[in-house]
Amino acid sequence: MKKIKRETVISVVVVICIFVLWFVSTANAWVDTKLIPSPKQVWKAFLDACKDYKGHSLLQHMGVSMQRLFSAFGLAVITAVPLGLLSGFSKTVRAILEPIIEFYRPLPPLAYYTLLVLALGIDNASKIALLYLACFAPIYVSCVSAVVRVNKDHINSAYTLGANKGQVFFSVIFPSCLPDMFTGLKTSIGVGYSTLVAAEMVAANAGIGWMVLDAKNWLRNDIVFVGIIIMGITGILINVVLGLLEKKLVPWSGKA
């Protein structure tokens, strides 16, 4: 039987302590349950939302949000990875792209969302575009950094052994970049998920982010807690899947 890691036990204990504190503080009226609903209220709201919330079930809200998120994330991967790798190789390409990316990267999503709505309309296109921009920058930056950090001795050794440029790229450079690329992917999906609420603020009638915003407007803090917990758990699961994929594809990650 596989031994459970000490860190895993600590994490589980911390989560249990948080839930116990939540239960005790609401049961003893240490906090106003209108502001912080009890676990029982949140569970009831979860069961109700599974059936229906404003015309859609919780699963349908999640499906709409995941479709937006993964459409944007997929587009970001297939564009940011090659552009990032190319920028790492070419200072000219980097000089062209970096000013644009470094300008918009620190901007809050709502700062330019209005421009996207004006350009693309209020339907899914503007929402996916916002998520795409949020996902693009972390992947691009991690790819550029990965190429720049590749050990030049490894590249020169490959050339010495008679490898051509294609062989050097696919056998030395690309494998060396994969650990940093996966770090960028994890960061990207996290940033994209945190931007999801902003993406669903305008002219949406479904989605987990929209559900949280709508519940806030109606002071349904129990639904707000449901949405936050669901998004947190989903984010953890996505990160776990990417971690397992990294272990499968990049077994040398973290090793000398």
Image: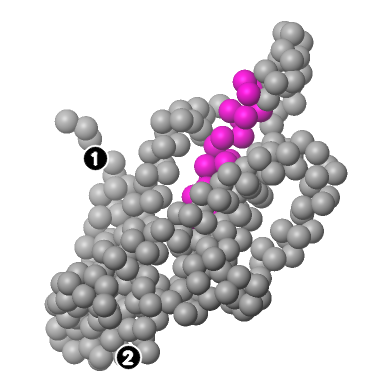
Q: Where does residue 9 sit, x and y in percent of width and height?
A: 25, 49
Mark 1 secondary-structure assignment: loop
Q: Quadrant of the N terminus?
A: top left
Q: Is residue 67 visible?
A: yes
Q: Determine whether, in the image, residue 6 is placed left or right of residue 242.
A: left
Which amino acid is tagged 2? Trp
Q: Where does residue 30 sit, x and y in percent of width and height?
A: 22, 88
Residue named by callout 1 = 4
Is the residue marked by circle 2 packed among few (<14), some (14-19), or many (20+) residues within 10 Å? few
Q: Upstream in the sequence, badge 2 or badge 1?
A: 1
Q: Is residue 21 visible?
A: no
Residue drawn 31% across the image and 90% down it: 219
Is the residue marked by circle 1 packed among few (<14), some (14-19), or many (20+) residues within 10 Å? few
Q: How is the image coloured?
A: one colour
Q: Quadrant of the C terminus?
A: top right
Q: Nearer the viewer, residue 129 or 170?
A: 129
Residue named by callout 2 = 218
Which amino acid is tagged 1? Ile
Q: Determine whether, in the image, residue 201 is placed left or right of residue 8.
A: right
Q: 164 above or below 184?
A: above
Q: Which residues are magenta?
A: 170-189
Q: 2 above or below 58?
A: above
Q: Where does residue 20 sit, x and y in percent of width and height?
A: 19, 70
